[in-house]
Image (cartoon, rainbow, N blue to C red):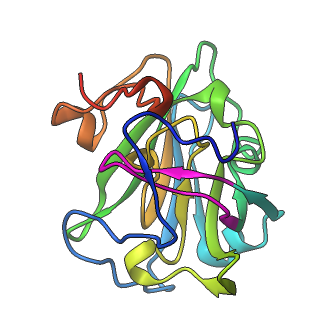
Amino acid sequence: MANQLPPGQFETEKWPILHKGDVYSFNKDNWHFKLFGEVEKELSLTYDEVMRLPKTISSIDMHCVTTWSKFGNTFEGIAFREFLNLVTLREGVTHVKIFGYYNGDRFGYSANLPLDNLLGDDSLFVYRWKDHNQDWETLSAKHGFPLRFIPPSSFYLWKGTKWVSGIKFMTEDEEGFWEELGYSMTANPFKEERYK
């Protein structure tokens, strides 16, 4: 599926900046990452604890619902599975919500995703990136610093939460921010699953 342009998309060399609400201003002293929901024990991690987790480098194509696609992106970050390894799930967990800051609310933004799709190297909480036009660069605040979730290329990019703050583990699917506003629950760009 790498470098495959989904229907209705055009290729761009740039990484457009799109978001709703204010740009989050990172403060290491009060930033925490919460793992909660259908887990045996909730966990809250500091920024330093998160950054001590094992790192992964992976190339992931990005497809935005606004019709642009960007190939040749290489990201460094923490694989979703590293967070999964820190908790014991209760029986029947099938989906997650990945939360992020929105207008000062730590859990104001969220995106729902099926758990099974998030276990590979292409499911990353990233903090730096590069492409064939530039060497490694720290993620900018507008792109989601200090940590942004980049989903596998089988999802539109609104599933890629900026300014992440936690993961909620769920036994059934649940609408996130854009899904509540009429966007697709599944968001497969190759099937043009843009809206409900």
Foreground residue, 139 or 53? 139
Foreground residue, 69 or 154? 69
- Establish if 138 lies above or below 123: below
- For image coordinates 56% across by 46% down, the residue present is 151
Going by the image, does 163 lie left or right of 104? right
> Which residue is at the far left?
181
Q: Main secondary structure of the magenta part?
A: loop
Is 64 colored magenta in this rendering?
Answer: yes
Where residue 82 sits in the image (x, y, percent)?
76, 50
Where residue 115 sits in the image (x, y, percent)?
60, 28
Span shown in magenta: 60-74
The quadrant in which the N terminus is found is top right
- For image coordinates 37% across by 78% down, the residue present is 142
- For image coordinates 18% across by 30% down, the residue present is 182
Is 143 colored magenta in this rendering?
Answer: no
Number of numbered labels in the structure image: 0
Where residue 122 sits in the image (x, y, percent)?
71, 47
- Establish if 196 lies above or below 82: above
